Amino acid sequence: MDIIITSCLDSSQKEAVQSLLADVKEKEPLTVSFPMEDGELFLLGWIGEKLCAVLSFIREGELSYECSAFTHPSFRRQGLFSRLLGESLFVLPPEAELFFYTDGNSSDALHTLDAIGAVFCSKEHMMTLSLEKSQDFPVSGLTVLETEESGFPLLLFADTFGSVRILVYPSHYYLYNFEIQSRFRNQGHGTALLRKLLSFLAAQKRMPVRLQVSGDNLPAIRLYEKTGFQISETLSCFLY
């Protein structure tokens, strides 16, 4: 197998990945997606002119990465994914923690995660909010700083009570590190901060806002639902 490592997929590579995903989804009713635009590291495994396996990484924290992997049904149980994963470890930081997510619809995926020794962590919900509707909430008291992370614009929002980060991808916003100071919790400040930043984002570009939350974190889920987020996907998280 020939392996290509790249930080960005070109048009022909995207076409090959889309063909692979179509073949995978014809065999299994998967809901998990592949980050064509948002990934910062891609490994593609080719046999001849056929793309047989693909692996991507999105940085979640300083040393943590969300990983997406697909192997063509005709080339499974041949160690292709393990070879891609092994190659990625030469590129990623030695202390990196890798998180794999599965919707449970692929027995092969569960078998592979077990084979590499990945450990189940938790159930995770992906939540999404459309910004098609206007968000006319006042943004007074909101501080917005612009910087960059992993090559993507990063917006840092803060007010007197808390802070939150938004990564700006080409297709959506990703919300993370949302925190209200402990002495101000359960007083409505979290809802107010979220509404302020949603109004700000809607005035910039009306893309979907996505976030990830543990299935056990019911207070956070209720907070996000109150501001319009809906669960779009439920996944099992495995740590490698």
Image: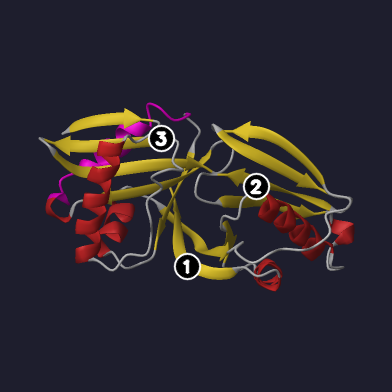
User: Taking 166 as reference, is 182 left or right?
Assistant: right
Q: Residue at x 61, y 61 (%)?
A: 131
Which mark is first along the chain, 2 or 3?
3
Marks 3 and 1, Cα distance to the nearest angstrom?
24 Å
Q: Residue 234, which numbered label?
A: 1
The amino acid type of the residue labelled 2 equals: Ile
In front here: 166 or 207? 207
The percent position of residue 182, horizontal first and vertical second, equals: 84, 57
Which mark is first along the chain, 1 or 2?
2
Q: Secondary structure at mark 2?
A: strand
Q: Secondary structure at mark 3?
A: strand
The percent position of residue 236, horizontal first and vertical second, equals: 44, 63
The percent position of residue 205, horizontal first and vertical second, equals: 62, 50
- Look at discs 2 and 1 and give the one toward the viewer: 2
Q: Residue at x 60, y 55 (%)?
A: 206
Q: Residue at x 12, y 53 (%)?
A: 74
User: Taking 1 as reference, is 204 left or right?
Assistant: right
Q: Secondary structure at mark 1?
A: strand
The percent position of residue 154, horizontal first and vertical second, equals: 64, 39
Q: Is residue 168 magenta?
A: no
* Residue hosting label 3: 41
User: Taking 160 as reference, is 198 left or right?
Assistant: left
Q: Residue at x 47, y 67 (%)?
A: 233
The amino acid type of the residue labelled 3 equals: Leu
Marks 2 and 1, Cα distance to the nearest angstrom?
21 Å
* Residue hosting label 2: 166
88 shown above or below 234: above
Q: Residues within 10 Å of mark 2 (few under 14, many from 20)?
A: many
Q: Residues within 10 Å of mark 3 (few under 14, many from 20)?
A: some
163 shown above or below 87: below
